[in-house]
Amino acid sequence: MCGIFGLINYGTDSCDKASAFRKATNHLFKISEQRGKDASGICVLTEKKASVYKDAFKGSKLVRTAGYSDVVKDMSYTRNFRAMIGHTRMKTKGTQRLNINNHPIIANKVIGVHNGMINNDDRLFHEYSDSINRLGQVDSEIIFRLIDHHISIGKTIIEAVKLAHKEMTGSYACAFIHTDMPRYLTLFSNAVSFSNAVLYIYKNVRSMAFASSKYILNESLAHSKWLNPAHTTKSIDLMMGGVRIDLETGKILKFKLDDQYKLKHTGYQSPDCNLCDSGSEMISGICSNCIMGGY
C-alpha cells in the first residue's frame, strides 16, 4: 500500500494561495505517511518545467530536506504553477535504496505515481524488450513505460492509458503527466477495494486536490483557507475509470478504462516544457537538472 496525492491550480495568482498550497503539500506528505514510510517523492509542474525530488525518506523527513525546498519553491508563483503530484511508498518490489525505484517514476516523457501492485510486469517488459527499456526493479515502472511507448507511436493520452490497462494485471491507482503535453494531468484507477482515491474540486478558487482516500484529504486540508474540504464544489470518486484534467481551464474529461470509444486528440504540445533532473545526466535528450536524491 502506498499513498498518492496532488494539487492543481488553474487560474488565480495569489501569494496567499501559494503559501496555502505549500502548507497543504507538507500536510499531505505527513498524513499520507501512514500508507508508506520507505520512501517518498514529489513532482512540481510549472508552465516551463517538471521538477522531481525523491529519496528513501518517509514523508515527514522529506519535507525537511533542502532538495524538497528547492522543488517546492516552484509553487511560490501560482501564475506559473500548474500541479503537484506526491507519493509515499511502502516497498514491495524493488529496494528503496535504488532511487530509480522510488516515485514519482520517470519513464522518458511520462512522470507518474502509483498505488497498488502489477503482477505481470516482468512478462510485459520481456514482450516489449525491443521498444521499452527497464531501468529499475519496481513493478510500477511498467505502467508509465507502456503509456509513454503508446503515446510515442501516436496514441492519445487516454488511448495509451486504455491500452496499458488491457495489458496489465494487478491493481492500480495512478496520476501522471507527460512533458510534451504539460496542459494535462491524468488520473486513473482499476481499484474497487484497496483504494478509494478521490478528487476534490474547488471551483471558486480554481483549484483541485486528490489523494488515495477522503480521509487523507480531509485530515490534510482541514485547516486550509483555500483548500478546506468544506469548500469543495464537487468531488469525483476515482474507481474503475479515469479523468484527464486540463490544467489551463480546469475542464475534466471522464473516461472508462474498458470501453472502445475513441476520443479526438486535442493535446497541447510545448517544446518549452523540460524534464529536469538534478543528477547531471540527460534523460532522452531532455535537460536534467532538478531531480535530487541519492541511491
Image (tube, helix red, strand yellow):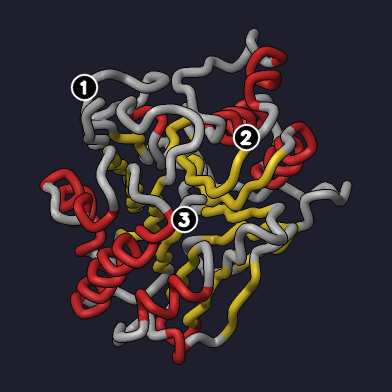
Query: Is 281 displayed left or right of 159 in the figure?
Result: left
Query: Dot 2: within a 10 Å radius of its alpha carbon, few (fewer than 14), some, or many (20 or more) residues?
Result: many
Q: Position of residue 155 (x, y in %)?
A: 71, 35
Residue sitting at x 62%, y 13%: 131
Check if mark 2's residue and mark 1's residue have beta carbons within 8 Å: no
Which residue is label 3 attached to?
Answer: 4
Query: Dot 1: within a 10 Å radius of its alpha carbon, few (fewer than 14), some, or many (20 or more) residues?
Result: few
Q: Position of residue 228 (x, y in %)?
A: 38, 85
Does residue 152 show up? no
Q: Nearer the viewer, residue 272 or 125?
A: 125
Which residue is label 2 attached to?
Answer: 147
Q: Position of residue 227 (x, y in %)?
A: 38, 81
Q: Please identify the quarter of the rendering in which residue 8 is found.
A: bottom left
Q: CA distance from mark 3 to mark 2?
A: 18 Å
Q: Please identify the quarter of the rendering in which residue 279 is found.
A: top left
Residue lying at the far bottom in this picture: please name it.
Answer: 230
Q: Nearer the viewer, mark 3 or mark 2?
A: 3
Q: Amino acid at mark 2?
A: Ile
Query: Dot 3: within a 10 Å radius of its alpha carbon, few (fewer than 14), some, or many (20 or more) residues?
Result: many
Mark earlier in primary sequence (2, 1): 2
Which residue is label 1 attached to?
Answer: 280
Q: Is residue 269 above or below residue 28?
A: above
Query: Is 110 displayed left or right of 55 in the figure?
Result: right
Q: Amino acid at mark 3?
A: Ile
Check if mark 3's residue and mark 2's residue have beta carbons within 8 Å: no
Mark earlier in primary sequence (1, 3): 3
Q: Is residue 222 above or below residue 287?
A: below
